[in-house]
Every structure is written in structure tokens, then in C-alpha cells.
Image (cartoon, rainbow, N blue to C red):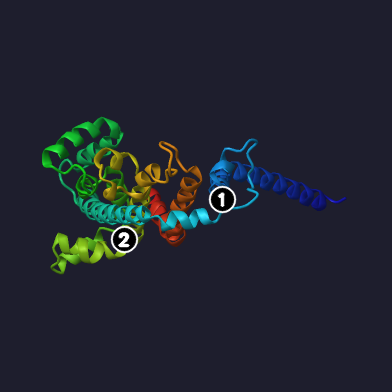
Amino acid sequence: MGYSQTKNKQERSRKILQYSILIIVAIFMMFPILWIFSNSLKTLNGISQYPPKLIPDNPQFQNYVEVIKNSNTLIYLKNSIILIVGNTIGTLLSSAIVAYPLARMNFKGVNAIFAIILATMMVPTVTTIIPQFLLFRQLGWLDSFLPLIIPSFFAYPYNVFLFRQFFKTIPKSIDESAMIDGCTRWQVFTKILVPISKPIFITVGVLSAVYWWNELFTPLIFIDSENLKPLTVGALTSFKVQGATNLTAWNLQMAMAMIMAIPPMILYLFASRFLVEGVKTSGLKD
């Protein structure tokens, strides 16, 4: 056996080992999703069956139909869409406007201001939730969408960081040329910088949309009315078994969980190219 054959055999063995490890890790990571999907196809009694079965004997696909037909599901879905649209618009507008002077203008204290903004990311959300609750109660905003949407118009630090890093990769000579031609700072921002910054706008928009699609904590704090709950909160309180109190139809909740996982995955498939481009540019070219 020649040297090249021995080398090819070793290379083949190395690849087989690598792929075997990757397959095992993938199965391990996918198991929770497979388990949820399996339970979503069982009857309520089938979920409590022991020993549990990964593949149900008689798959109950009508569980998904029952979840979709539930009138509350459409109300929760509408509320989630309102929160996503409102927060995404607020996040994009405020974060881009705050990041622009931090990235493109030289003035005294700009680095200190940016450092303070970054430092606020270290403050845990739970430490500010009570002051927020008291403030929104004084404003009469509790049990409405306002305390969930309005804060996004004041720029989240992490999104400001992403926008600033991306804006810094664009040559400042573009700004200078436009201003020599008579453009104001605002015109440079809206007519030149925003159009060529599509990857970072899509990246932040997708991150915001996915965050508010999954957000559970703040709606639980600020929303009480059933007709204002988003899909995440509604999924926790719906699907009770008729004739029994405090008994949850776990099979229907599992079906709801699988349905909720689909939109973020579709969004990622459509925006993955921009996500990689936006994060890569903001991270390497500063």
C-alpha cells in the first residue's frame, strides 16, 4: 500500500469520525424538538403513558387543526404581530438615529457617551422592571400595548452598538462629499447612509422581530386582559380540558409550540444572508 493510499484512508477515517460526532450532537440537540413534535401528535392520555413512546401509535394531526381553529389563537396572533411591528419600527428608527452621531461625528465626549450606553447593557432587566411598572401605572399605560412598544423608541444599547459598528465601516469621505454639495447631516443620513446600510437594518429588524415573537416576561407583567395577550402568554393559559379545572391539554400546547417555532425559522431562511453580512461587517471592519 503506497503512501498516498494510506493518507487517503486516514483522511476518510477522520471524516467518518467527524461526521459521526456531528450526527450524534445533532440528534442530541434536536431531541427536545422531536419530543415536543411527538407529544403534539398524541392524545392527552397518550402523553401520560408509561413507558413513553417517541412515535405515537395513532398520530393525532387534528390537534393542529384544533389549535388553529381556536378563536383565541387568532386574537393572540394579532396581538403578537402588533407588538412585533411596533417594536421593530421603534427599534430601527431610534437605534439608527442614536448610532449615527456616535459613528460619524467627532465631538467632545463621544467615546464616553458610547461607553455609558454600553454599560447600561450590564444592568439586569429584573432590576428595572419595578420602577418601570410604577412609572407606567402613573401614566395609566398598564394593561395596554404602550408599555411594551414605547420603550423601543428610546434605542436599545445592543442595537445601537450594532448600528454604530456598521456605520463606522462606511468611508467618511461620502459624508464630506455630500456636505460639500450642500446636503445637511440629516440628508446625508436619510438619503445616503440608510440606503447603503440594508444588511444591518435587516439584521436588527429580524433580531427584534424574533425577540418579540418569543417575549414572555414583560407581557406577563403589563398585560392582564385576555384580548391583549400575545401568543406566548396565551399559549400558557389556553387549552384547558373541558369539565376539569387546572388541567391543561398538553398535547394541544405542544402543537401550539410547534406552530410558534415555524415563523422564526422561515424568517431566518429568508434573511440569513443579510444576517451573516450585517454581523460580519459590524464585527470585523471597525
Is 90 or 31 nearer to us in this picture?
A: 31
Is 238 or 152 nearer to us in this picture?
A: 238
Q: Which secondary structure lies at badge 1? A: loop
Give the farthest residue toward the right.
Answer: 1
Dot 2 surroundings within 10 Å: few (below 14), some, or many (20 or more)?
Answer: some
Q: Is residue 95 above or below residue 52?
A: below
**Disc ID at residue 24:** none
Q: In the rendered structure, which disc, 2 or 1, sits on the residue that comes first in sequence?
A: 1
Q: Can see residue 286?
A: no
Q: Nearer the viewer, mark 2 or mark 1?
A: 1
Could you tell me the amino acid type at mark 2? Answer: Ser
Is 48 or 243 nearer to us in this picture?
A: 243
Q: Can see residue 255?
A: yes
Q: Position of residue 189 (x, y in %)?
A: 21, 60
Q: Which residue is mark 1?
A: 41
Residue at 42% in and 58% down: 69
Q: Which secondary structure lies at badge 2? A: helix
Residue at 36% in and 46% down: 234
Quadrant of the image occupied by residue 186? bottom left
Q: Which residue is mark 2?
A: 197
Q: Position of residue 73 (x, y in %)?
A: 37, 54
Q: Is residue 200 above or below residue 129?
A: below
Q: Is residue 154 above or below residue 201?
A: above
Could you tell me the amino acid type at mark 1? Answer: Leu
